[in-house]
Amino acid sequence: KKMEQFLLDLKQEQFNGSYDLAYKTINHLRKLISQTRWTHAQELMNTIKKEGKKMITAQPSEYVVGNMVRRVLKIIREEYVRLLGESEESANKESLHKMLTAEGNERDDHTKPLKELKTTVIEAVNEYIDEMEASIHNISAQAIEHIHSNEVILTLGKSRTVEAFLKQAAKKRKFHVIVVEGSPLYHGHELAKSLASKGIETTVITDTAIFAIMSRVNKVNHRLKSCHKLASPQEVLDYYDGGTEELVNVQIYSPTFDYVPPELVTLFISNIGGNAPSYMYRLLSELYHPDDHVL
């Protein structure tokens, strides 16, 4: 019943942003690890993958769900190898070819029963949750390294991480933030009000004014949201019922998120520091196992 309710909450988008969704997902997976019966790591991973597919199907536009599933699978693999006594260096050493191609590689055997595995996996998941909770603080602590005085910064919508990042920088820097309102939800107004309350010079602009203002901008600051979502077109353009004969084979796409090409991104800032896009493959190999890229 809990799983069914969780899937229903996913479908109905009963969560407050990516962090809240990530926390609820990994907390559900932690309960799954502790409450289900399994004899070895492979059986547990099969269970996690099965439930993970259901969760991804329930909310396919939110990539954080699949990423949490993949992260837990990597934790299980790491704890299994550690308990077997293999060196962490040899266990984590994966070639770039294996990381990019999930096929043509022998899969490690994870069928040996290990008595302490459940305890160590739950402890490792708890440590990861603690790391998640501290991530916003760790990211915002780097703000002064990236934001300089008198810069003009453009940001879109409302993100708790971006908000904390800008407020931290404002403690020692004077800069101007231009917030795109983000029609039709207008979350940008909430962010602008919050930033202005901390004495940050803030300007709200419409979505259509982005191109005109871009020449004045030094940095574009935005949380990572690698997805696009199909929403009701009525939120953007109202319509009326004109009869089914007028609506045959008509499809209208209303993207809620824009896709940002990777070549336009110059820096990724995570809780462990800033990295160039060319280094992201290494971060992915540390967080996720190549065998779990496709669930």
Image: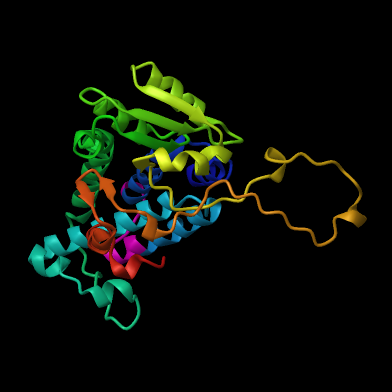
Q: Is residue 51 visible?
A: yes
Q: Nearer the viewer, residue 222 or 60?
A: 222
Q: Nearer the viewer, residue 83 or 97?
A: 97
Identify the residue at image location x=33%, y=76%: 101
Point out residue 268 in the picture as x, y percentages from the top left corner.
29, 50
Quarter of the image for residue 178 reads top left
Identify the residue at image location x=28%, y=35%: 136
Point out residue 264 in the picture as x, y percentages from the top left corner.
38, 56
Residue 295, above or below 32: below
Q: Nearer the viewer, residue 81 or 57?
A: 57
Quarter of the rendering occupied by the C terminus: bottom left
Residue 90, above or below 147: below
Residue 22 lies left or right of residue 146; in this view the side is right
Residue 92, above or below 186: below
Q: Which residues are magenta?
A: 34-45
Quarter of the image for residue 152 reads top left
Q: Is 126 part of what is drawn in magenta?
A: no
Residue 61 lies left or right of residue 135; in this view the side is right
Residue 178 lies left or right of residue 236; in this view the side is left
Point out residue 162 in the picture as x, y percentages from the top left corner.
35, 35
